[in-house]
Amino acid sequence: MDTVLARKNMNETNKIWQDVIDALVDPTAGMDEEEREQYLGKIIAKLKGGKKLSADELEYLRLHEPQLYMTAMRVKHKKEALEHRLKNCRSKQEAQDIIDTAIGGVSKNDPDREYILAGLREVEKEFKGSKFYKKLPDKEEETERKKILQYIENDITPMAELLDELPVFEAKA
């Protein structure tokens, strides 16, 4: 009898602790149904706008909307991948090619297409507004042209640079 009573008390205690943990983790704890719907609407609007979701918003989706959470995570990863590729580009033309490839790579049949495209467009907008982008040459050839001008300014030709690298052999007569 005591064992059954102890187990019942333990189960009730576990349930209380689980409720406390859920309240701490769930950003909508204490909200009524209408407020939760508004919160979800705000999250969906941010996703459709390509905006970054906060940790609380992602946690809400993970707990209450697992399918939308998976969509948000796909968008997040695709945005991060595009940002990483853009950081390594050497011209505005290369950056545009990277963006076009990323956007063109989203299938027309993808159920998350709207969210992914919005996210990629947001990354494009942020990148094109950055100082890094403004400093990039328009095309790759301009970078090559700058190298050639640097050689000319320093009186170094590619052939002279190559000859400087070659070992020197002395022949005894």
Image (cartoon, rainbow, N blue to C red):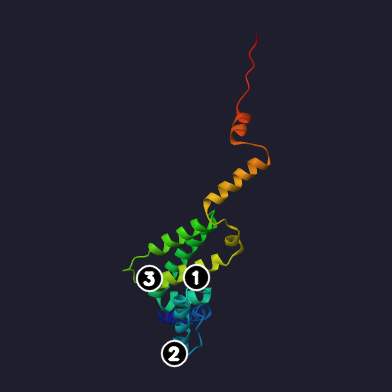
Label 2 near label 3: C-beta < 8 Å?
no
Of the numbered discs 3 and 2, the one sitting upstream in the chain is: 2
Residue sitting at 61 percent across and 29 percent down? 163
Q: What amino acid is at disc 2?
A: Glu
Q: Horizontal and vertical percent for residue 144?
A: 56, 46
Viewer-proximal residue, 18 or 60?
A: 60
Within 10 angstroms of label 3, few (less than 14), some, or many (20 or more) residues?
some
Q: Residues within 10 Å of mark 2 (few under 14, many from 20)?
A: few
- Disc 1 marks a residue whose amino acid type is Glu
Q: Residue furthest top?
A: 173
| Callout 3 secondary element | helix
- Amino acid carrying label 3: it is Arg
Identify the mark at residue 140; answer none if there is no mark. Answer: none
Disc 2 secondary structure class: helix
The residue at which mark 3 appears reads as 113
Q: Disc 2 versus disc 1: distance between alpha carbons? A: 31 Å
In space, the residues marked 3 and 1 are separated at their CA atoms by 14 Å
Mark 1, other Cα within 10 Å: few <14 / some 14–19 / many ≥20 = some
Q: Position of residue 77 (x, y in %)?
A: 46, 64
Q: Earlier in the sequence, mark 3 or mark 1?
A: 3
Where the C terminus falls, by quadrant? top right
Lower sequence index among marks 2 and 1: 2
Residue in the picture at 59% in, 62% down = 134
Tell me the residue that label 2 is attached to.
Answer: 33
Q: Is residue 124 visible?
A: yes
Give whichever of 33, 118 is nearer the camera: 118
Can you identify the residue that label 1 sits on? 122
